[in-house]
Image: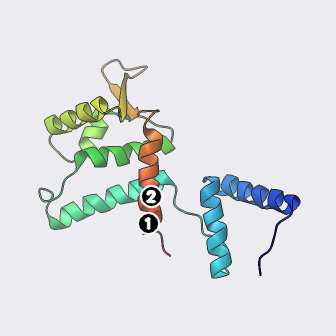
Amino acid sequence: MHHRFSSGELARLLGLASSIADKHRCSTEEAIMLLEKAVMEDRPPVRPLSLGCFAARWRRLRARRNQMLGADLMRDPAWDMLLDLVSAREEGQELSITTLCQGSAVPMTTALRQIDRLEQLSLITRRPHPSDKRQMLVSLNAATAPRIERLVAMFRDMLAPA
């Protein structure tokens, strides 16, 4: 049976999706996916991990993997830095270059080269610390942050329980 929705019903559905998106701090698209899952599974929708939380967990998992298998075997300091910056962005923070380098678990010179490369690719932005001129702060570039966040969201959604 095919049901046609009235304009009032469609407006209510859109309002419901918008309310769920606001309540769970996710996009309307993610809210619709939550509704679909709830209907198909006949249970309340589960809130997906925020991007920052997922990025931080992924980062910890990668670090644990490197400990277990040998850090020299699998390193991707640029990606680890981007994951750290996604987490920081969600918390409204910027990271110092020192913090970002230390978190990458590679030698400082290697980490600094990666930061230079990420900046050349317009993925990150550096700026002087407002109160400590000895420090530089790093954040995701505002223009490219949505692309990076979409990529992290894609991984999060692919790894979410079905």
Name the residue at 82% across, 66% down.
Answer: 5
Residue farthest to the top, as pictured: 133
Q: Tell me how many marks there are.
A: 2
Name the residue at 65% across, 62% down.
Answer: 32
- The image quadrant of residue 140 is top left
Q: Is the N terminus in the top left, top right, bottom left or bottom right quadrant? A: bottom right
- The image quadrant of residue 7 is bottom right
Name the residue at 36% across, 36% down.
Answer: 123
Residue occupied by mark 1? 158
Q: Position of residue 11 (x, y in %)?
A: 82, 56
**Dot 2: element:** helix
Q: Amino acid at mark 1?
A: Met
Say if residue 82 shows up in the picture: yes
Numbered mark located on residue 37 in the image: none
**Dot 1: element:** helix
Residue 56 as seen in the image, left or right of residue 107: right
Say if residue 87 shows up in the picture: no
Q: Position of residue 97 (x, y in %)?
A: 29, 32
* Closer to us: 144 or 63: 144
Q: Position of residue 36 (x, y in %)?
A: 64, 71
* Closer to us: 25 or 104: 25
* Crowd class of label 2 (few under 14; some 14 to 19; many from 20; radius 10 Å): few
Residue occupied by mark 2? 154
Q: Amino acid at mark 2?
A: Met
CA separation, marks 1 and 2?
A: 6 Å
Name the residue at 55% across, 63% down.
Answer: 48
